[in-house]
Image (cartoon, rainbow, N blue to C red):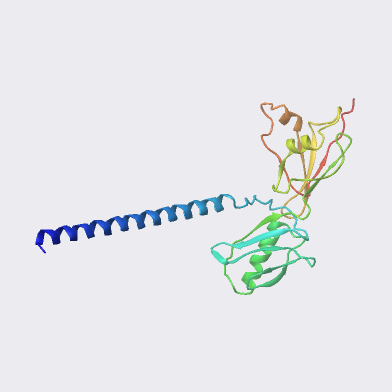
Amino acid sequence: MSSSRLSLIALACLLIGATAHAQDNSKTGKNTTAASKNTAAKDSSAPLIMATDPGYRLSLGDEISIGVHGEDDMSTAERIDKKGTVRIPYVNEITLADKTVREAENYIEQVLIERKLFKKPLVSITVRDYATNEVTLTGRGVRQGVFPLPKEVASIEIVELMTRYGGFTANAKSNDVKVYHKDETGREQVTSVDVEAMMENRKNALKSFPIYPGDRIYVDERLF
């Protein structure tokens, strides 16, 4: 066999090998792209956890996430059981019911320090699902009752709340709506909100006033 013919055969083999390698890379690229798309789709469908009011008082049945900054193995998601407790890694059961979120965070930090697990832990708690996700409307100026907040939110704007549940009566004192909310220490604070100005989008009106689970709203009628 001549040397020129051998050279042609060798060249053909090289071309066939290169083509096969390119096809393999193409398939791998497609698979990688598909996997990336699937991962992105999963990430985009992940539930959004809303920020939690630090003054919210934890109740039996609340589902909460507990995390320690920089310590992934300490993260857990638990529902507060009938005894008012949850289980935390390396700590076992701990009672959190009837504590505000901030009180519960401080309490867990203290327990971790006392058990010499951490020197300066930074604990965060988020309520994933409220057992009692309700607000109370009272007074002659509104439709009275206990009303649920949407399950997917941690709070609702006061204007949206009033619109959702019937608004005000004709003589309602909507410029002086009393909102009763428990702060981080558990004390009930009262704030007067001019909802009328917010609804009319007046220049000096508040842009936002969130209402949280457990809040009470009182609306009286005008004296005329």
What residue is rendered at 74% in x and 60% in y? 99
212 in relation to 201, above or below = below
Residue furthest front as drawn: 1
Along the line of sight, the residue nearer the viewer: 109 or 162 = 162
Q: How far across and down, in percent of the image, does residue 79 sit?
A: 72, 62
Q: Quadrant of the N terminus?
A: bottom left
136 in relation to 3, above or below = above
What residue is rendered at 65% in x and 60% in y? 65
Q: Quadrant of the C terminus?
A: top right
**Numbered disc total:** 0
| Displayed quadrant of residue 105 | bottom right
Q: How far across and down, in percent of the image, does residue 52 sit?
A: 67, 52
- Along the horizontal axis of the image, is 187 left or right of 40? right
Q: How far across and down, in percent of the image, does residue 189 sit?
A: 77, 46
What residue is rendered at 76% in x and 49% in y? 213
| Displayed quadrant of residue 217 | top right
Q: How far across and down, in percent of the image, does residue 151 sit?
A: 73, 49
| Displayed quadrant of residue 131 | bottom right
